[in-house]
Image (cartoon, rainbow, N blue to C red):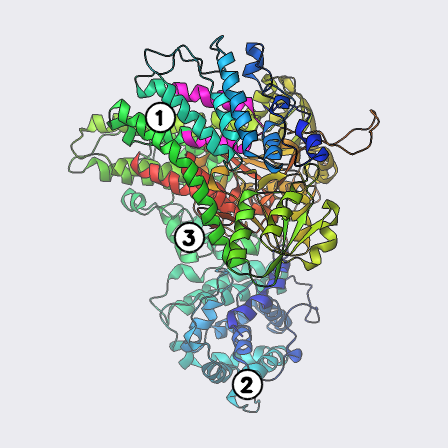
Amino acid sequence: MDPRRTARTVSDPKVRQVGFFTPAPPERSISDPPRFQDPIQPPSPSPTQVNDHSPSGNSLSPVMIPPAHHHSDNFLRMAPQATSPTKAFSYSAKTVTIPPENEDVASSFSPGRKVVSAKSPSSFPGVKASSVPASELTTVSVVNLPPGISGNVYKLKGKLIAEKAGGASVEVQNDRPVSAKTLKEKTSKAERRALQEAQRAAKAAAKAEATKASSAASKVVTSANTKPSKAAKPSSQKNDGSQVAASEKKGGDRAPEKDRKKDAPHPRMQYDDKSRVEKAKKRAVVKQTEARNRVELFRHLPQYEHGTQLHDLETKFFELDPMHPAMYKVGLQYLSGDIRGGNARCIAMLQAFKEAIKDYSTPPEKTLIRDLTARISSYVSFLIECRPLSISMGNAIKFLKNRIAKLPLALSESEAKSTLMLDIDRFINEKIILSEKVIVKHAVTKIRDGDVLLTYGASSVVEMILLHAHELGKHFRVVVVDSRPKLEGQLLLRRLVRKGLSCTYTHVNAVSCIMQDVTRVFLGASSVLSNGTVYSRVGTACVAMVAHAFRVPVLVCCEAYKFHERVQLDSICFNELGNPDAISKVQGREEINYLDGLVNQENLQLLNLIYDATPSDYVSMVITDYGMIPPTSVPVIVREYRRDHLWS
Amino acid sequence: MWWRSASFILDRQQEQNTSFPPNPESLLLSSPPPSMADSLQNPKPDISAYYQTRAAHHAVVTSDWLAQAQAAVSLQTNDDVSSGSDGRVALTGGGTGVDNKTFSVIDEFNSWRKQPDLAEAVAAIRALAAVIRASQATTMMELEIELKKASDSLKAWDATSISLTAGCDLFMRYVTRTSALEYEDFNSARYRLIERAEKFGEISYKARRIIAMLSQDFIFDGCTILVHGFSRVVLEVLKTAAQNKKHFRVFCTEGRPDRTGLRLSNELAKLDVPVKLLIDSAVAYTMDEVDMVLVGADGVVESGGIINMMGTYQIALVSHSMNKPVYVAAESYKFARLYPLDQKDMGPALRTIDFGVPIPSKVEVEKSARDYTPPQYLTLLFTDLGVLTPSVVSDELIQLYL
């Protein structure tokens, strides 16, 4: 009866549903089948039940988890009654008034984390049952239940209350200033969630015109909230709408360069953590506008309105004095998508670093090692703002920083610079260019006459393999599988056809039809993680899975410098979001405009993922510069490789 | 990379009379290779020499047959005065020892492999040791190049034998990797290498002992073990178990076409182990009663799968679908840097199969002698490095070769 376990099972179906639907579609009524069926629950107050019910009962529960649905339903119900959006918000303000002991539990269920915190000290039924219902039950004259049962029953009641009492209960709640005062300094995540949820619900209810009012209203609420808790982070209360506005407002003032260079946003920042995002934004060079409708499951990933930043950056060119022009150029190229593909991006970045190091001179009273490292970090944070780093780039940066840190102190500046530049060149040559050649050499041995090779997307290594095999006079056919929106396969196809290979081109939709003729599948990868998971262009997992089902061997070609010791089980935790417009529109086909004008609707969320994770079960072999290895041996390579990272 | 091969001379002889010692004249050694090209290649390019030797060993071997075989070998080497070729490491003897006598690593190897208890890899390493002994090289580099040539020619001579390839690679690895060799003078380094090679025979025997000891934990009283083909390691395992007074039952497959299972059942009967002989097609029928499958391996490949006598794959498939564990007993020198993706990804090692009745020429016969069992159908590998899961094989290989 592990509480976490039950919580998880409860949330599972919900998560699936949430991924592609808005959390609170206006049409949804309470009679909808999913979510909690409270009556079914046995009345005995087992700790697990209390645990997973109470947050929702509190209306503290995470926005995207199903209890939230039911909650938002409550909101919807009352929304008409609460004639003005402000009312609705005052209701939400009530939700803030949870007794502090609850905080832990509540926050442990916050959906954005997706991790249920291991220890929730106040999660015993006793505490819960007594404290939680206390706030809820006072609103209506419900019989005082014994604390044991109430944990379960109050939910039912709470629901009824919400439906029946509507605005009235709100007022009652608001009349309790004491609990509002007892707010602890930090507003918990769940509170923010609840707030957000409330605002969204209000918006939906009040339809179009309400949206405008809501931002104003939210400001009222936020200001009201911040008053009692001075120490609360101001950013935390903002919701999507107000936040966009706020960020645009702040566009003018840029934080001084000094603190920007030191704390670059962590490459894996959780973008649903509002306070961090806010902080990072202050430092940011590139002013990205955050996209409005993001799919719930992927809220922790950054997503920006595309097309706005480029112009913005261009105009800023002369203001960004600490940025080296070469870095600036590379950043812009990433942003506009001129450079793509793991190797190309990595090489471009390293070349830019080289340029920057060449022009670098140590400022007076600083040491080269420290100052240069800081400088590099600031460049990296700039690049991250342009586009999130790939794992290969992360590894290359790690390498470079390592080299800088290992520089002997006795070295003069020019010597140090030239060593570093040599190191960079060596990295490019040995780890990227040479290892590609080695991979080609290995992979070609697996191509026999009469083979039909399938590849997905456009991988530079796979292209080299195919061309080399062709040069060796092997007779084989190539199937290039491609997918929208990037259609990179066409580029590959063009180069292959020009060299005289016989090719078939199809989209990923047809992969199950074409797979029965195929004898080998060659795939590129953005990274291979240490549990053998292949992190690659979205769609790769699908191709690998189909190939596995047809018992066609899947060969993944990946240079060892792209390996990473991380373990990843799904493609949700770490990923990159592309421009949602790319999937809503078809280039060159104006008549396909069904989504025009719908893009900013609250109940439409577009998901354009860039990567996905292929489980190692579907991979027969990983071809690296160290030879052909099974995916289970990736950690061995990572270990060995790490060693020569440090000592070479 | 691999030679297509066919005929399998010994097969018929065995069938005619198993107790009849094969006449060495009928073996491939009978005639000295007439030309260079022939000696470079396998004299019978169609035969998978590895499987032929195995079959030869599994027939009843008498000591006088061995003597004859060795005589034939020495006869052959004497005949080969003619030349040095790139296929052979030709060494003109200096003032001492070997006078004007061509040394062929292949012949050396062949003489070693005739010993039935000597594993193929050991034979290869012994042969390479002989190269060192006969070598006139004066620097480590020279010696290394010479060794490289020798091992390449060995590998090319019988490309179907995985343990031969693995043995050569292993020894070459040892030579190039042992850093101690760089610091001492050439002669002592040379002796060290020779010594090492000599020791290897012992190591291989010891490996078998270690495997037998390790696997005892897995054989429990009252269990039924299915074995396929004849493997020295498997025999050693079962022998040790019998000596430890375990009560178990063994099902032996027949092991067509060379009937290696018959030989194993003979050996086991001698040990008073209850044995039941099955025809190869009865595996699925009896799988219900079986508690575990125990097979040897010709080679263990990088994926953790094994290459073994034909039929192993289907036994592994059947036992996998019935949730019976499949254990593989193999010495670590059989680990090879190969990575077959499927059955056809290896060069074929062919043999003739006697069906007892004439087969019309229009009918094709599948002659492959071995198959590849992917790692997902294997439970554990008993090796002298310990009891490993299939995925560890690659880790070991990476440690060894990278």
Q: Could you tell me the amino acid type at mark 3?
A: Val
Q: Could you tell me the amino acid type at mark 2?
A: Ser
Quarter of the rendering occupied by the C terminus of chain A = top left
| Span colored in magenta | B145-171
What is the quadrant of residue B322 in the picture? bottom right
**Mark 1 burial class by Cα count in 10 Å: few <14, some 14-19, many 20+:** some
- Residue hosting label 3: A277
> Does the magenta segment cover residue B157?
yes
Q: Could you tell me the amino acid type at mark 1?
A: Asp
Please tell me whether mark 1 or mark 3 is closer to you in this view. 1
* Chain designation of label 3: A
Which residue occupies the extreme top position in the image?
Answer: B82
Question: Which label sits on residue A425?
Answer: 1
**Mark 3 burial class by Cα count in 10 Å: few <14, some 14-19, many 20+:** some
Pick the front one: A62 or A254: A62
The residue depicted at 69 percent of the width and 59 percent of the height is B289
- Residue hosting label 2: A150
Spot occupied by residue A395 in the image (x, y as percentages of width and height): 39, 39
CA distance separating discs 1 and 2? 69 Å
The residue depicted at 44 percent of the width and 16 percent of the height is B103
Choose the circle earlier in sequence order: 1 or 3: 3
